[in-house]
């Protein structure tokens, strides 16, 4: 069965950096795009990053562009989110999600919590 | 960017009753719309894609309809496990992939 397990969350000061990871299993990872989606406390869902199956295409919303970088290692079945210049408004639970070819998200991990606070 | 608007924000329903949730897109998304269910402390779960196709393992009491800019998620007879927050998401024009703000279905 498909499993996505996020890690790397924690508490970081404003301006700091954090690297999230998502370990995938149960499907042919190298065949699918992957997303990161976040949810601020008590708020809705916000898409944060996408990477194509081969890593050649990446997209970000304006809210994180230039600060966040998505990457993947198809030999390790993992996807990462490098987050730099973190702000209080980046505080959220971050989920990785498997892409149904550039469409919706059919499987989600349980999330990892990021808190940006001094 | 396509803005998704859900209504109502909160829906109070008794177990066994029907629940009808609405989602509106700021421009046509054809039928490229998905619905997700999220329970407290859990990840979202895919319910519906293509506006009306149930995902694997989703009970028949969940149904989706609509096209263009107006969509509906109907839960025909609410069970205790259905009380949750529901989100719509468009995947017609991306990036960005955009979600509605959610509808909370609570026990009346």
Image (tube, coloured by chain):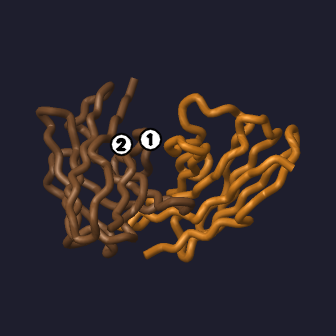
Chain colours: A brown, B orange
Q: In which quarter of the image is the C terminus of chain A?
A: bottom left
Image x and y of residue B12, in percent: 82, 54
Image x and y of residue B96, in percent: 38, 67
Secondary structure found at label 2:
strand
Image x and y of residue B17, in percent: 87, 44
> How many angstroms separate mark 1 from mark 2 (CA)?
6 Å
Q: How crowded is mark 1: few (under 14 residues within 10 Å), some or many (20 or more)?
A: many
Q: Quadrant of residue A75?
A: top left
Q: Which residue is drawn at 20% across and 56% down?
A: A82
Secondary structure found at label 1:
strand
From the viewer's side, name the closer residue of B73 and A49: A49
Q: Can residue B45 be seen in this view?
A: no
Q: Residue at x 82, y 47 (%)?
A: B107
Picture layout, residue B104 above or below residue A87: above
Pointers 1 and 2 in contact (C-beta within 8 Å): yes
Image x and y of residue B77, in percent: 82, 39
Disc marking residue A98: 2
| Mark 1 belongs to chain | A
């Amino acid at each position: 069965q498909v499993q996505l397990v996020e890690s790397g969350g924690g508490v970081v000061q404003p301006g700091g950096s954090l690297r999230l990871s998502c370990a995938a299993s149960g499907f042919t990872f190298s065949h699918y795009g992957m997303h990161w989606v976040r949810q601020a406390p008590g708020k809705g869902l916000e898409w944060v990053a996408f990477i194509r199956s081969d890593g050649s295409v990446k997209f970000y919303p304006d809210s994180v562009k230039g600060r966040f970088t998505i990457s993947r290692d198809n030999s390790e079945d993992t996807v990462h989110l490098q987050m730099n210049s973190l702000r209080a408004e980046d505080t959220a639970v971050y989920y990785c999600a498997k892409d149904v070819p550039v469409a919706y998200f059919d499987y989600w991990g349980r999330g990892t919590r990021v808190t940006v606070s001094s | 960017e396509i803005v998704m608007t859900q209504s109502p924000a909160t829906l109070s329903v008794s177990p066994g009753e029907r629940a009808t949730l609405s989602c509106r897109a700021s421009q046509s998304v054809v039928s490229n719309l998905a619905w997700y269910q999220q329970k407290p402390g859990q990840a979202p779960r895919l319910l519906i894609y293509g506006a009306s196709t149930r995902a694997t393992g989703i009970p028949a009491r969940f149904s989706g309809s609509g096209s263009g800019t107006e969509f509906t998620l109907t839960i025909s007879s609410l069970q205790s496990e259905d009380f949750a927050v529901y989100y719509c998401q468009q995947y017609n024009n991306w990036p960005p992939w955009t979600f509605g703000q959610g509808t909370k279905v609570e026990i009346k």
